[in-house]
Image (tube, rainbow, N blue to C red):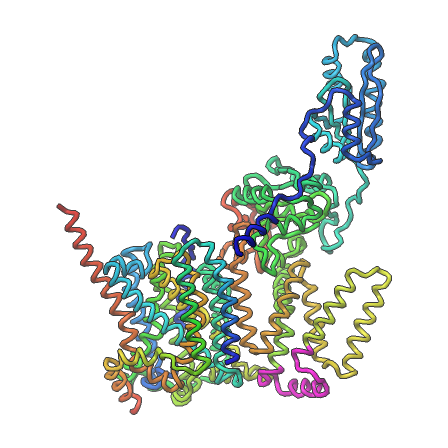
């Protein structure tokens, strides 16, 4: 918990620094993207520290492509066993 | 894009070579020798030839609109919304490649070099380095690659020369007599890794300041692929099929065989150093392509806006990517193949077809 | 709340000190008396301003005055060529020819009497002060709003001496001085080309320092020349006391440990730079002349490289790069090897290092930081010490810190070797400012090595190269000709090929006038 709050504080500091730079661009979209991006980033990093579930990219890709990938892996395995 | 940064053709070639070598240099011998046995090097050769073929496809896409990157092309070919959706999926591919490489790097370092350091810290440091690269832009990345390239090539040749005394020709005999089918199959996981990943270069090919860029691309992939073939061959020659297959990082083990005058021994870390450089550029390119995609997707003014949040996201996803090294290998041989084929082969071919279709339509509209 | 804060911040940003009185632009006054009081009042009756009043002519004497700054003006020149001519020659000339009106007198004085070489007509008070305070002599006539400034600058200076910061075994032994005129002469004497141009301006509201931009027209790229001039124009400051001021005010990037401008006190180095197409900036009051654009490799080259045999200088250049690397990496490599990668050290060596370190109570990082810091302190002390105490420092350094610290078991002998290797390596670098940047980076690497071992060092190196690659000096990438690579430029980069092979100027600097030599390989004509 201490670690999480420390990282949050640090991120806030980085965010302010970065916000100062983005402000100069005078683009509303950039400001919003940065703010939302930081929010998402913080959500992930905090959930990593607090051991909350984070989606695994491999599983995601696996779920979609496993059915197609199955024949490939079966074929490859057959060679491995030789 | 008023001020388009430009990189030279030579720098582009170097980046391509770095990307081909990237993660592959240290793990590929193990993957191919598992299926092709003593003919593993032949699998790499096959994959290289396939890779060269793919580059021809990518070049054709590039040639259609030499001043647009893949994201802009997608929007142009498939309309704004479908284009954006495809862009997003493509970015997912880039994202996966980036965190995959990051994870491979982290795993390697925590298992072989810094055993007590937590993998998060190792990956974080690597990510910070890449962050600097992305922040400075493609021009700086390319220049840095140009600086490191001679040392990488020199180190690879040094490694190969220093271990040749240990080579035994019987290790790869009989040449292409048995297990040829296995060699063909072994090329499969190699297609996506590293050759189909070259599709990422379409995201900034318009930044290359050279008319012969298509040739440069081909040269890069050829040199990179041939280096991989040679490294696999030497691994098999020196370590034998069994040792090569059983280790996750056979090239690193190869480095352990170096012994100069019975004094300088165990300098395998030199191999690791070559590899750090190449994989660094690979992660940076993936990261950069991702960021460029976001700029195009959200129509941002400056691509740098999303760099910092992505440091967090990449780190977290790399940590939670998979639980073990074994699972990585399993992933690489199953879902990875169709996944990489989708974005490296199907999408580009689709783009080509759509381009043809559009051209015809455009031509018809123009003629009357 | 925020608005109030912002408002106060804006208020603070108000104008820079500009209490220089606006009267300065007014024309010269009619009478000598008025002018005298004005000058005296403005300069606060400073006692180094000499104002000599006298009368001109015999029949209708006109009041006249001569002003100069004592110490800045050459007194002999003022006496012989200004006062004497005005007071004696004018009178004699008048005997022969009657001067009809006063305008005639003015022209006569200008055309016949003032025998000084540099003569400018001045009309405003501002010009009077500018000339007076630069050492010129002012001549004013009663009833005229025009005056003369006679060039009479001649103050005590150091004279041309040997360079103290960059010495060579072979090569010219003269160095720039504090006087800009001498410095331009030193350059002009070497390059007798009509295309060598000096573009002068005064910078500094109060110091009014002379700055000269020197370049060879047609060789230096116009972009760079205009860029330099533009950046100089943007400077708004009250004083320029050394070329370091200019460097800091016009360099491309402030937040970098690497020098982006090259400075030297050797005229031959400046001339070589000019002939390659660079631009020199001379600043009055300092012997250090700036040369732009400066690239990374320039700091590893010494002008002596071109006077020695090419094979030897190539070797020396490679040695310098190696030394740069050693100075940067050695302590961190020691830390990484002893704490993380013991297996890389050959066993006998490992045993002896372990035996040495047995009694040392600190981890390698603390040991290294301690010794490096001590060395930096010693070095800094040695530079600014009175010379008489210098030997005391070296005794303290070598005997007490080196030997006794080892004997007392505070540091290991291996560490002392590492520190001395680092120190000697950093002295190999021919330019002081790149050696300083190495000193700074070294500490970052040590910390990285202590946490991540060789992995940290490698990533540190990558970050450093990325940073170097991102730098530019006046539009030229800092790492050229390595990145972007120029194959032709490799003839004079890491190594130096014989002069007859280098027929072209550096391609990264020149787009025009590329050929500089067309000499064939020297061979005996008869055999």
Extreme residue toward the left, this view: B368
From the viewer's perspective, is residue C306 above or below residue B36? above
B161 displayed left or right of B45? right
Does residue C499 appear in the picture of this structure? yes
- Nearest the camera: C11 or B65? C11
Q: Which percent across, then down, holds residue B110?
A: 49, 83
Extreme residue toward the right, this view: C388
Magenta residues span C338-367
Q: Which image quadrant for residue C205?
A: top right
- Nearest the camera: C14 or A42? C14
C421 displayed left or right of B141? right
Q: Which percent across, then down, holds residue A71?
A: 23, 83
Q: Which percent across, then down, holds residue C17?
A: 67, 43
Magenta stretch: dominant SS? Answer: helix
Q: Residue at x 65, y 68 (%)?
A: C327
Q: Residue at x 61, y 84 (%)?
A: C346
Does residue B187 appear in the picture of this structure? no
- Nearest the camera: C362 or A60? A60
């Amino acid at each position: 918990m201490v670690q999480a709050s420390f990282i949050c504080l640090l991120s806030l500091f980085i965010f302010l620094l970065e916000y100062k730079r983005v402000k100069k661009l005078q683009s509303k979209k950039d400001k919003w993207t940065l703010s939302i991006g930081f929010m998402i980033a913080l959500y992930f990093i905090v959930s990593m520290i607090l051991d909350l579930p984070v989606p695994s990219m491999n599983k995601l890709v696996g779920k979609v492509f496993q059915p197609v990938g199955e024949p490939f892996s079966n074929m490859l395995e057959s060679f491995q066993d030789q | 894009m008023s001020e388009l940064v430009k990189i030279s053709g030579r720098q582009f070639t170097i980046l391509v070579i770095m990307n081909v070598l990237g993660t592959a240099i240290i793990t590929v011998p193990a993957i191919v020798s598992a299926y092709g046995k003593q003919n593993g090097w032949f699998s790499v050769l096959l994959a290289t030839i396939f890779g060269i073929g793919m580059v021809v496809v990518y070049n054709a896409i590039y040639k259609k609109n030499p001043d647009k990157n893949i994201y802009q092309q997608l929007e142009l070919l498939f309309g704004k919304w479908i284009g954006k959706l495809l862009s997003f999926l493509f970015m997912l591919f880039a994202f996966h490649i980036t965190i995959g490489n990051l994870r491979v790097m982290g795993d390697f370092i925590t298992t072989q070099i810094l055993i007590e350091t937590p993998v998060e810290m190792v990956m974080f440091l690597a990510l910070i380095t890449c962050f600097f690269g992305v922040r400075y832009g493609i021009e700086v990345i390319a220049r840095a690659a140009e600086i490191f390239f001679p040392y990488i090539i020199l180190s690879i040749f040094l490694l190969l020369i220093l271990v040749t005394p240990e080579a035994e020709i019987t290790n790869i005999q009989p040449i292409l007599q048995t297990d040829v089918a296995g060699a063909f199959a072994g090329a499969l996981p190699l297609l996506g890794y590293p050759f189909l990943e070259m599709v990422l270069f379409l995201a900034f090919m318009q930044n290359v300041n050279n008319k012969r860029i298509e040739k440069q691309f081909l040269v890069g992939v050829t040199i990179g692929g041939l280096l991989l073939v040679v490294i696999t061959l030497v691994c098999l020659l020196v370590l034998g099929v069994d040792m090569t297959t059983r280790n996750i990082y056979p090239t690193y083990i190869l480095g352990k065989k170096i012994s100069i005058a019975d004094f300088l021994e165990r300098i395998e870390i030199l191999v690791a150093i070559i590899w750090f450089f190449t994989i660094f550029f690979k992660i940076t390119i993936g990261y950069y392509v991702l960021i460029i995609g976001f700029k195009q997707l959200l129509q941002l003014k400056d691509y740098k806006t999303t760099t910092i949040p992505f440091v967090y996201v990449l780190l977290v996803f790399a940590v939670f990517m998979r639980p073990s090294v074994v699972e990585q290998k399993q992933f690489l041989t199953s879902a990875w193949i169709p996944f990489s084929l989708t974005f490296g082969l199907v999408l580009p071919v689709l783009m080509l077809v759509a381009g043809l279709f559009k051209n015809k339509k455009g031509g018809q509209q123009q003629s009357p | 709340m925020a608005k109030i804060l912002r408002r106060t911040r804006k208020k603070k940003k108000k104008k820079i000190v500009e209490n220089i009185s606006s009267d300065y632009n007014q024309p010269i006054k009619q009478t000598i008396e008025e002018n005298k009081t004005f000058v005296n009042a403005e300069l606060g009756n400073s006692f180094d301003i000499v104002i000599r009043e006298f009368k001109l002519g015999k029949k209708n004497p006109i009041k006249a005055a001569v002003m100069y700054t004592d110490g800045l003006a050459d007194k002999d020149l003022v006496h012989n060529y200004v006062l004497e001519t005005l007071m004696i020659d004018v009178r004699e000339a008048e005997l022969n020819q009657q001067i009809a009106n006063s305008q005639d007198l003015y022209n006569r004085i200008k055309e016949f009497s003032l025998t000084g070489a540099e003569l400018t007509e001045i009309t405003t008070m501002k010009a009077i002060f500018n000339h007076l305070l630069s050492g010129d002599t002012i001549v004013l006539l009663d009833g005229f709003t025009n005056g003369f400034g006679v060039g009479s600058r001649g103050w005590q200076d150091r004279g041309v001496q040997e360079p103290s910061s960059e010495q060579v075994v072979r090569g010219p032994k003269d160095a720039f001085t504090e006087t800009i005129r001498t410095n331009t002469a030193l350059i002009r004497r070497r390059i007798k080309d009509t295309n060598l141009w000096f573009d002068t301006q005064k910078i500094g509201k109060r110091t009014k320092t002379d700055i000269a931009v020197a370049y060879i027209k047609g060789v230096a790229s116009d972009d760079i020349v205009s860029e330099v001039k533009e950046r100089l124009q943007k400077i708004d400051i009250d004083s320029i006391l050394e070329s370091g001021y200019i460097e800091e005010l016009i360099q491309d990037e402030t937040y970098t440990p690497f020098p982006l401008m090259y400075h030297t006190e050797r005229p031959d180095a400046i001339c070589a730079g000019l002939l390659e197409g660079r631009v020199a900036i001379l600043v009055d009051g300092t012997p250090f002349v700036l040369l732009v654009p400066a690239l990374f490799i320039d700091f590893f080259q010494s002008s002596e490289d071109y006077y020695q045999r090419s094979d030897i200088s190539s070797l020396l250049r490679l040695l310098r790069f190696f030394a740069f690397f050693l100075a940067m990496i050695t302590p961190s490599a020691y830390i990484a090897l002893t704490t993380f990668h013991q297996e890389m050290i050959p066993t006998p060596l490992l045993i002896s290092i372990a035996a040495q370190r047995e009694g040392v109570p600190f981890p390698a990082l603390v040991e290294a930081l301690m010794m490096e810091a001590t060395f930096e302190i010693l070095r800094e002390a040695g530079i600014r010490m009175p010379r008489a105490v210098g030997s005391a420092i070296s005794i303290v350094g070598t005997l007490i810190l080196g030997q006794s610290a080892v004997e007392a078991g505070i540091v290991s002998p291996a560490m002392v070797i590492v520190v001395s290797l680092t120190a000697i390596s950093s002295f190999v670098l021919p330019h002081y400012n790149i050696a300083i940047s190495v000193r700074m980076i070294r500490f970052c690497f040590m910390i990285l090595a202590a946490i991540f071992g060789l992995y940290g060092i490698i990533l540190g190196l990558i970050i450093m190269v990325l940073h170097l690659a991102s730098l530019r000096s006046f539009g030229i990438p800092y790492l050229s000709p390595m990145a972007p690579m120029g194959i032709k430029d490799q003839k004079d980069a890491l190594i130096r090929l014989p002069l007859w092979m280098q027929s072209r100027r550096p391609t990264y600097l020149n787009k025009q006038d590329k050929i500089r030599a067309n000499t064939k390989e020297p061979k005996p004509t008869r055999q």
